[in-house]
Amino acid sequence: MVLLTKFCDPEEFDYVMVKKACDGAGIPMIQMEVDRQMVNYEQAGTMMEAFKDML
């Protein structure tokens, strides 16, 4: 899982390299964006559950 902070360009640039490396190695991954002021994490939990079920 790659966790990115919304609107953080350096993290977004790094994601491309991480995604390519994981794809090349056959490692499944999920990318999630969070806001530093988030108070509700239900959507993130749902995404992680769906990813777990795909594995």
Image (cartoon, rainbow, N blue to C red):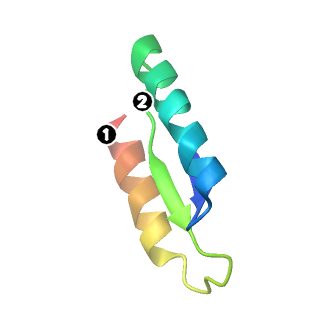
Give the mark nearest the N terminus, 2 or 1.
2
What residue is rendered at 54% in x and 76% in y? 41
Q: State yes or no: discs 2 and 1 in contact (Cβ < 8 Å).
A: yes
* Above or below 29: residue 41: below
Q: Which residue is mark 2?
A: 28
Q: Could you tell me the amino acid type at mark 1?
A: Met
What residue is rendered at 31% in x and 39% in y? 54
Q: Which residue is mark 1?
A: 54
* Above or below 52: residue 5: below
Q: Could you tell me the amino acid type at mark 2?
A: Pro
* Above or below 4: residue 34: below
Residue 27 shows up from this direction: yes
Residue 1 shows up from this direction: no
- Mark 1 lies on a secondary structure that is helix
Q: CA distance from mark 2 to mark 1?
A: 9 Å
Q: Is residue 24 left or right of residue 33?
A: left
* Extreme residue toward the left, this view: 54
Which is more foreground, mark 2 or mark 1?
A: 2
Mark 2 Cα shell of 10 Å, populated few (<14), some (14-19), many (≥20): few
Q: Position of residue 11 (x, y in %)?
A: 63, 49
- Mark 2 lies on a secondary structure that is loop
Where, quadrant-wise, is the N terminus in this rendering? top right
Q: Is residue 39 left or right of residue 45?
A: right
Q: Along the line of sight, which residue is nearer the eye, 22 or 52?
A: 22
Residue 40 image-quadrant placement? bottom right
Where, quadrant-wise, is the C terminus in this rendering? top left
* Above or below 7: residue 55: above
